[in-house]
Image (cartoon, helix red, strand yellow):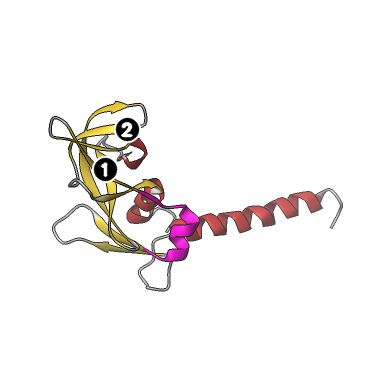
Amino acid sequence: MSRRWIPAALMLAALALLTGCATEAVTASSTAQGPAKVEKLAGAEQSKVTITDKAAQRLGIQLGTVQAAPGNLLVVPYSAVVYDTKGQAWTFTNPQKGVYLRHKVTVDSVRDATALLSAGPANGTAVVTVGSAELYGAELGIGK
């Protein structure tokens, strides 16, 4: 192999390794051995996403809590809100360890890093503030 091809071969090998690592963190799998398991919920557009502790750690999943606000509004960190391709707002709830459910929300307004919701999960519900986009990608099967 000539000297000028060595850097290109090294870059391709590094790219292959990086691509494999990134895919592992968000790939949905139908087996319990995979980092994520996606189960379609009966009668719902959403699915239940279950991830391993290692996958949660690699994704950097962080949680916050829905809070009540005056005027029958709910408050979540704006980072907890994700939008689908139709512009619908969602948040991922965390009803039990490793389990995430996408929940439709209605954003009333955004102030600084806070979203005021006129509809959403109940006060006190745990919501994902970091890692929602990756959970959404796993739910949709992106990278599968």
Q: Which residue is mark 1?
A: 90
Task: Give the side of residue 3 with respect to residue 132, left or right.
Answer: right
Residue at image point 19% right, 45% down: 123
Nearest to viewer (mark 2 / mark 1): 2
Secondary structure of the residue carrying tag 2 is strand
Q: Earlier in the sequence, mark 2 or mark 1?
A: 1
Residue 11, which numbered label?
A: none
Quadrant of the rendered structure where residue 90 is?
top left
Secondary structure of the residue carrying tag 1 is strand
The vertical placement of 79 against 53, above or below, is above
Image coordinates of residue 70 in percent, x first then y, are: 16, 31
Q: Which residue is mark 2?
A: 114
Around disc 1, counting alpha carbons within 10 Å, would you say few (fewer than 14), some (14 to 19), or many (20 or more)? Answer: many
Task: Give the side of residue 120 with respect to residue 29, left or right.
Answer: left
The vertical placement of 74 against 92, above or below, is above
User: Between marks 2 and 1, how big is the CA–CA gap?
Assistant: 14 Å
Residue stretch rendered in magenta on the structure: 51-63
Image coordinates of residue 71 in percent, x first then y, are: 13, 30
Return the residue nearer the eye: 117 or 48.
Answer: 117
Return the residue nearer the eye: 55 or 73.
Answer: 73
Q: Amino acid at mark 2?
A: Thr
Image coordinates of residue 126 in percent, x first then y, are: 28, 51
58 in the magenta segment? yes
Image coordinates of residue 2 in percent, x first then y, are: 86, 54
Residue at image point 44% right, 55% down: 143
